[in-house]
Structure formats: C-alpha cells, structure tokens
C-alpha cells in the first residue's frame, strides 16, 4: 500500500490530534466553570492575587508569535528562506519570553505562599485553594505545550535551513504552525478565566 503523502492526509491527521488537545483543555475549562459557579466570590478574590500586567504581556507575546509563525509559513511558500528563518526565530524568542514571564509570575506567587495546599490558602476560603489549583494545573499544562511547540518550531527551523522544508514540502511546518496557533488560542481562553475575573 502506498504511504499517504498528500497535504490533505497530513493536515487531517494533525486536525484529529488537535481535536484531542481541545478536548483536554475544554474539559479543564468546564471543570473551572463548575467550581466558579460554586465558589464565585472565592474565585474573584483569587484572581485579584494575580498580576494582570503579566497576563496582558503574555497575551501580546503569544499573538506576536503567531504572526511570526504565519509569516514564516508564507515565506517558505514564496521561497523566501531568510524571512522564514527570521519568523521562526522570532516565534521561538516569543515563546522563551513567555516562559520566563510565567516562571517569574509563578515564583512570585510561591514565594508569597500562594500555591495549592499552602498554609495561606488552607487558612483562606476553600474556593481560593481550588482556584489556584486550577491555575497551576492549567497554566502549567499550557507551559508544557509551549515547550513542545517551541521544540517543533526549532526542528522546523533546522529543516528550513537545510532545505528539507520547501515550498513543495511544507506540510511539517504547516502542522507545527497549526499546533502553535492552538497553543495561542488556548491562552486566549486562559487569560480572561484567571486574570479578568471580576
């Protein structure tokens, strides 16, 4: 049997994989909604402990990174390898800055005793412990997806440089781009759920 090499087959496989990722995060968002309904005031109080500046900056960073990825795919299709490489480097830099910001934010919260099971949260209302439990699980899982996405973009960068990804063979880069856009889209949901609760 001849292996599947057409663009439609490659893209369909990627969309099926992305669907499983949507189910994963969708389930966590539903869990958040159930607890938010039960502990609304505690969730609002928990959100006030988060720094909106970090949330806004990270949102902008990921939106810019999506632009870089889209630009690199377009550049490959037009055989502008230097622009494609620059776009991939830009996306990788954005991903790194995002992770550094998240590390600083997490570190600040942990330093102040704000983490699931901490004495500070155990002494506060029960809903706040749930809020921060979900915060660390969802943002941590998202961070892992950022690292995976950066790895895929890094591999794509090397393959573009080696002329293994070209205008005629860009399925890998396109699929990596789809994955990166999903990671960005997930953050667009995370940001208001945790930072804009009022």
Image: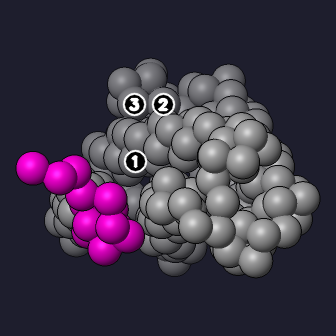
Task: Describe residue 117's horizontal placement relative to residue 93 as left or right.
Answer: left
Residue 3 position in % (x across, y down): 22, 51
Q: Which mark is residue 138?
A: 1
The alpha-carbon separation of the residues under discs 1 and 2 comes to 13 Å
10 or 1: which is nearer to us?
Answer: 1
- Horizontally, residue 101 falls left or right of residue 124, namely right
Q: Quadrant of residue 152?
A: top right
Separation of residues labelled 1 and 3 (CA atoms):
13 Å
Is 8 within the magenta?
yes
41 lies above or below 153 = below
Residue 155 occupies quadrant = top right
**Label 3 neighbourhood size at 10 Å, few (<14), some (14-19), many (20+)?**
many
Q: Which mark is residue 116?
A: 3
The residue drawn where x is 24% and y is 57% is 4
**Mark 2 closeness class: few <14, some 14–19, many ≥20 residues within 10 Å:** many
Residue situated in front as seen by the camera: 97 or 17: 17
Q: Where is 51 relative to 59, above or below?
A: above
Query: Mark 1 or mark 2: which comes first in sequence?
Result: 2
128 vs 181: above or below: above
Residue span colored magenta: 1-13
Residue 115 is labelled as 2
| Residue 143 locus on image (x, y percent) | 53, 41
Q: Secondary structure at mark 1?
A: helix
Query: Closer to the observer: label 1 or label 2?
Result: 1
- Answer yes or no: is residue 61 visible: no
């Amino acid at each position: 049997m001849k292996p599947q090499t057409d663009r439609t087959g490659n893209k369909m496989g990627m969309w099926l994989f992305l669907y499983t990722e949507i189910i994963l995060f969708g389930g966590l968002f539903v869990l958040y909604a159930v607890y938010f309904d039960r502990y609304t005031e505690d969730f609002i109080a928990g959100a006030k402990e988060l720094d909106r500046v970090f949330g806004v900056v990270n949102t902008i960073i990921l939106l810019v990174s999506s632009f870089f990825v889209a630009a690199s795919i377009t550049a490959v299709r037009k055989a502008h390898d230097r622009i494609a490489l620059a776009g991939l480097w830009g996306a990788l830099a954005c991903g790194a800055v995002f992770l550094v910001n998240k590390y600083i934010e997490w570190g600040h919260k942990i330093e102040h005793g704000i983490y699931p099971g901490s004495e500070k949260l155990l002494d506060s209302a029960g809903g706040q412990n749930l809020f921060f439990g979900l915060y660390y699980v969802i943002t941590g899982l998202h961070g892992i997806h950022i690292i995976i996405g950066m790895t895929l973009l890094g591999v794509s960068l090397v393959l573009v440089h080696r002329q293994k990804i070209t205008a005629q063979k860009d399925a890998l880069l396109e699929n990596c781009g789809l994955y990166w856009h999903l990671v960005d889209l997930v953050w667009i949901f995370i940001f208001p759920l945790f930072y804009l609760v009022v």
